[in-house]
Amino acid sequence: MTSPPRRDRYVDWLRALSLIVVVVWHWAFTILQWKPHGPEPTSPLGFTSGLWILTWLLQVLPLFFYVGGHVHLLSWGRACERGTGLGRFVWRRLRSLAIPALGLIGVWVAVGAVVTWLFDVPWMWRVVLLVLSPLWFLGVYLVLIALLPVALLLHRKYDVLALVWLGGAALVVDVVRFRYDVEWAGWLNMVIVWGLAHQAGFFYDRIVALPRRYDVGILWTGLFALFGLVYSGIYPGSMVGVPGDKWSNMAPPTFVIVALLIFQIGLVEVLRPAMERVLERPGWNRVNAVINRFALPLFLFHTTGMAIALGLSWWLFGSLTPEVPPDVWWWLERPLAVAGPLICTLPVIYLFGRRPRTGRPDTG
C-alpha cells in the first residue's frame, strides 16, 4: 500500500495568506464617509502619493487564482483515482462554495429589507451592497470552476499554448477598450484574465521543478512588464481601484494583471526555499493549519464583522466620519481598525462558519 503524497504546506500558506491580505486590506484601508445618500467608500491611495506601489505586493488575487488552479488540478487527479466523474466533481466544488455565499447574501438581503421597512432607512441597501461587494471574486471563482471541463481540455490538448491564447485575448480586449472606447468589452477580461491565472496554476509543478535561476528570471520578467505597461501612460499604477482614476486595473482587470501574475509567481518561487524551512517548524505548521481552516469563513464574514464594529463604534462614540485626506492619527489607528472588526468577526465565524475537523483539510 502506497502512502498518500506529502501535503504541500507552501500551497496552503499561499492560499490562506492571499485571502487574509484581502481581509486586512479591507479592514485597514477602507475609509467610509457618511454622506446624505449613505456610506461611500474611498481609500488612502487617492490621497497619499506613491502608496500605489504597495499594491504590486498586496493585490494578491492573481496569486489566489493561480494557486486555485493548481489545487483544482490536484483534486481532479484524486477524483479520477476514486472514479468520480468530471460533472460530479465540478458540482461538488460549486456547491461547497456557493451554499455558504448564498446563505450570507440571503441573510443580508433580509436584514436590509427589514431595516428599510421598519425604520425607513433609505441608505440601508448601500450598506448591504458594501458588505456583499467583496464576494465578486468568489462569483468569478465559481464561474471558473464551472468552466473547469473546458480548462482541462485546453490544458490537455494545447498545453502552454492555452496561456498564450488567453494572454493575447486579454491584450486584444484592452486594445478594443482603450483604443476604440468600447468600455463594455473590458468585462470580457473578468473571465479571460482570471481564467489565465487559474490556467497558469496547472503548470505549478513544472514551475516548482525549474532551476532557481529561472525563478529570478520570471520575477524580473513580470517586474519589467509592470513598469513598461504602467509607465506607457495607458494603465494606472495601482493594482486596485483608486477614486478619481479614469480606469482601474481591476474593475474590469486589464493586461497589467497578467504582468502582475508573472511577477508574483516569480516572487513566491524565489521565496519558496526560505518559507518551506519556516513552515517545517512545529509552531508555524500549527499556525498554517489554523489559518487554512478558517481562511474562507474569515473572508466570507469579514465585512459582516466590520459592519458590526462600525455600528458599535457609531453607537458608543457618535459620528465616525474620518478626516480626508487621512492624517497621522488615522495611520496610527490602523492596528485598531484591524482589531475591532476581527473581534466582531470571530463570534460570527464561531456561530456560522465552523467546519468539522478532518484529518486532511479541504484542498479545493
Image: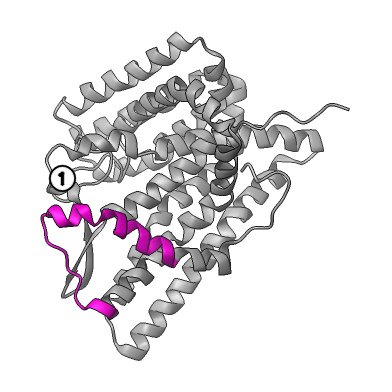
> Residue 35: percent from the left, percent from the top?
16, 71
Q: Is residue 37 above or below residue 203?
A: below
Q: Secondary structure at mark 1?
A: loop
Q: Is residue 115 left or right of residue 35?
A: right
- Residue 50 included in the magenta stretch of the image: no
Q: Residue at x 13, y 45 (%)?
A: 48
- Position of the N terminus, as image quadrant, is top right
Q: Tell me the quarter of the picture where residue 206 sits.
A: top right
- Position of the C terminus, as image quadrant, is top right
| Residue 166 appears in the picture as rendered | yes
For this rendering, which residue is in front, 128 or 175? Answer: 128
Q: Is residue 12 above or below residue 123?
A: above
Disc 1 marks which amino acid? Answer: Asp
For this rendering, which residue is in front, 55 or 280? Answer: 280
- Which residue is situated farthest in the right direction here? 1
For this rendering, which residue is in front, 102 or 23? Answer: 23
